[in-house]
Image: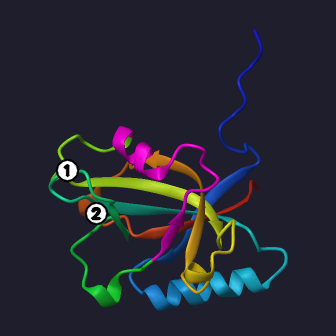
Amino acid sequence: MPRKKAPFPTDREFVNGPHLGDPQAVLTWIEELQAQPETRNLRLRLPVTVLRDASGVGEPNFVVGARPDLPPEAVLELYLDDTRLGIPLRDRIATLCPRDPAAPCMIVVEGTWGPLIDVPDLSEEPTLALTHVLRFEGDARGGNETLYISREKR
């Protein structure tokens, strides 16, 4: 029987990046990485809280980080580009989150910085082009607020 392909590159690992508490510092850090050819297109992994309306029918909103109660100035606003996923982000959320839309739901998203397709209205929005959406495996009370970056295993 043929062996299944590994879902993630096995020659890479994720290491801690900056804390998500200061959105401007995070964006500056990412822009600095993007300016260097050897670190451009690194994969980023970060926790996201999914906010759904009470009916569960409307489009969900996303707050970067595992704590939706942060003040607006501490929230990193990010557009999540699901073009590469094949299955829309909304459908993935339906399988990862509790059925009750009032229940808290946290996921982990992974992707590369910048949109896959340039869209004029979104060209100035900070964008993460998603490659994976994962179940949040952590303690939200601990405030898992770290951005992770991919690098070659040592």
Q: Label 1, on which residue?
A: 101
**Which of pointers 2 and 1 indicates the residue nearer the eye?**
1
Please state if 60 lies on the left or on the right of 77 as rendered. left
**Horizontal and vertical percent for residue 55?**
17, 52
User: Three-letter amino acid code at disc 2?
Assistant: Gly
Q: Secondary structure at mark 1?
A: loop
Q: Residue at x 76, y 56 (%)?
A: 154
Label 2 SS: helix
Above or below for 9 versus 40: above
What crowding class fits label 2: few (fewer than 14 Cα within 10 Å), some (14-19), or many (20 or more)?
Answer: few
Mark 2 highlights which residue? 142
User: Residue at position x 25%, y 70% from top?
Assistant: 68
**At x 51% / y 90%, what residue is drawn?**
25
Q: Which residues are magenta?
A: 78-95
Q: Please say if 138 is above or below 99.
A: below
Task: Tell me where residue 65 appears, x and y as whole percent.
Answer: 37, 68
Look at the image and say whether residue 84 sits in the magenta stretch: yes
Answer left or right for 120 relative to 54: right
The quadrant of the picture occupied by the N terminus is top right
Q: Are marks 2 and 1 in contact (CB under 8 Å)?
A: no
User: Which picture quadrant has residue 141?
Assistant: bottom left
The earlier-in-sequence mark between 2 and 1 is: 1
Towards the viewer: 11 or 118: 118
40, 86: nearer the viewer: 86
Residue at 55% over, 85% down: 27
- What whole-number distance in Å separates the C-alpha atoms at marks 2 and 1? 23 Å
Q: Is residue 8 left or right of residue 50?
A: right
State the image coordinates of residue 119 (x, y, percent, origin top left). Answer: 63, 75
